[in-house]
Every structure is written in structure tokens, then in C-alpha cells.
Image (tube, rainbow, N blue to C red):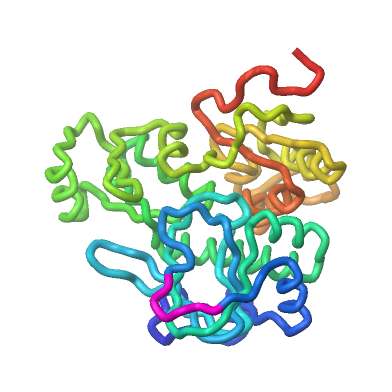
Amino acid sequence: MTDPASHLQPDGAEGRERLFPRLTEPQLTRLRQQGEVRATAAGEILLDQGQLTDRFFAVLSGEVEIVRPRGGGEELIVVHGPGEFVGDVHLLSGRRSVVRARVRTAGEVIELPRDHLLALIQTDADLSGILMRAFILRRVELMASGSGDVVIVGSNHSSGTLRLKEFLARNGYPYSYLDLEQDPAAQDVIDRFAVSLDQVPIVLCPGQRVLRNPSNGELADCLGFNELIDADRVRDVIIVGAGPAGLAAAVYAASEGLSTLVLESVAPGGQAGSSSKIENYLGSSRRIRARPCRPRLHPGGQVRRRGADRAQRGTPALRAPALRGHR
């Protein structure tokens, strides 16, 4: 159930069902077969902010609340009841959680390790469609609400500020923004961390780490974008560039069982992911709007579902030899 004070407030029953679908008993049974049922206690932390999202939880009884730690308190996002599940696209990528999942009312949950969930959604089309849609829409709503564990302090007249905002937005990472020219709290942040103007923009990462005018690669490292990428693993296929062609190649390579890695310096989707309209798109005789296509290009979408990995760096992500049988 959704708490009346929820931060995410979809319009009407239909909007709520899209973000927080309730699984049927047959669907829960299939989840049980891949995981384990365990009891929960009120106040138990199932997943904490900043922790790698390596487990999936479906609620059988009781309630689980999703909150965002903020300052000295918490901001309620939603409360999950029986039949609902915890998670968004970071569960597919294994990145750090931007929220905290805590048991509100004791009960039972189905717990699945992340690799079990990934295996299940590759073979169960029914659950795959429900989970993928909910995961992506939840992240879209969280982005729209401006609720995240990262704070950018800068100016809209600064190219560095615009670059970092675009980097996080295109990667679907929620953040808060303080404008030096309009928000009095921004100057307090600058004074607290002794930041000079030539070091703006600054980024407050989870915890106490502060980045001064970071590169995209430095910000990706601070947020743990590539923590699960094994730089020493030998790959069958490496694809440089995550535009439509690169993502399509990754989907087909991974579908054939090849160990696949996609390298991208900014975000998935390439130019198509930031264009208002696309001309000469394969299979379409007319210009199409790019915005409706973006969820399909999301890093937690079809590429992840097929088992391909994606790395973003401004620094080298791999060591030679990277490709099996090649030098």
C-alpha cells in the first residue's frame, strides 16, 4: 500500500499500479522457487543507502517503507505492502542504493540474490515485463521529484555545472541542485567546505566526500557506477559506444551467450538519447520523437536483462588482454 505521505504520488489508481504493481500468487510462487522466504522484524534494514543493491525483496506480509536519509532525518518515498516488491534499475546494474528499505511492520518477504533475479527475468517473460517496467518508471519518477543522495552546487551559467547535471540526468541518477545565484543555502555549503569559486561546481557525494569540479569519470567512480565491472575478466565481445547500434549489438551478442561489455563515456543512447526527434530511424518512414524511446535505452533495460555489462569511465576501465584470442 502507498502511505498518504508518500513522496512519489502517481495520479490515480492506474498510475499507482504502473509504479507499484501487486504480484499475483502464481508470480510470487515462481519467485519463491528462486529465493527463500524469511521473517522480518520491525525496524530491520533490508537495504541501506549507499549499499550495493545485491538482493531483491517481495513482500508477503507486513510492510516495508522506502525512505531517503536527508540531513538529520528521513524523507518517506513509499510504503510497500503484501504482493509488492522493493527495487529500481540499480538492482539490475548492482549499483549503490540511493534509498533505504526498512521494515515498518513485521511479516515475511521473499529474498532473492541479484544473480538469481537476473537469471529469472531472462527466462520468465511475464515477470520480466512487470519488473522492468516498474523499475524504470520508479527511477523516472524519482528523477522528476529531484530526490537523490547527490547534491550539485553550481551555477546554470557554468559549463561544468551543466555537464554534470546532464551526465547524471542521462544516466538516470537522481540528484538535488543548489544554485549559487538563487539559493542562499548554496553559499552555506561553499563556506562549510572552504570551496573557492574556481572549484565550482562541487558535488556532495553520499557520505562526506566532496568533489570539486570533477570530470564525468571522477563522478562515476564516486558513485560506484563501475564497481561490479571486473577489469581483468576476459571478454568475448567489447563494444565501444552505447548508441542505438552499440546497444543493439550488445543485446544480440549477450543473447547468443557471449560475455559482452559495452564501454561508454557519457550515457546510453548516444546522440539519439539527447535528441528531440530522430530522422531515418530504422523501420520508420517518418521522424520519431526520441523521448518515448529513452526508457528502452535505459541502462537497466534490455541490455542488462540480457546479461551484458556496461562501463562508464573517463579513465581506462580494462587491462589487456581484453578480447579472447586477440592481442
- Nearer to me, 262 or 50: 50
Instruction: State the image quarter where residue 256 is shown.
Output: top right
Residue 46 lies in the magenta-colored region:
no
- Nearer to me, 278 or 296: 296
- Residue at 78%, 23% (x, y): give it: 324
Location of residue 195 in the rendering, given as x and y in whole percent from the top left corner: 18, 36
Total residue callouts:
0
- Residue at 47%, 63% (x, y): give it: 47
Instruction: State the image quarter where residue 114 is shown.
Output: bottom right
User: Magenta: predominant secondary structure element?
Assistant: loop
Is residue 163 visible to us here?
no
Residue 149, above or below 67: above
Q: Which residues are magenta?
A: 39-44
Location of residue 232 in the rendering, given as x and y in whole percent from the top left corner: 63, 27
Location of residue 237 in the rendering, given as x and y in whole percent from the top left corner: 77, 30
Is residue 256 visible to us here?
yes
| In the displayed structure image, the side of residue 192 where residue 313 appears, left or right | right
Residue 43 lies in the magenta-colored region:
yes
- Residue at 79%, 57% (x, y): give it: 122
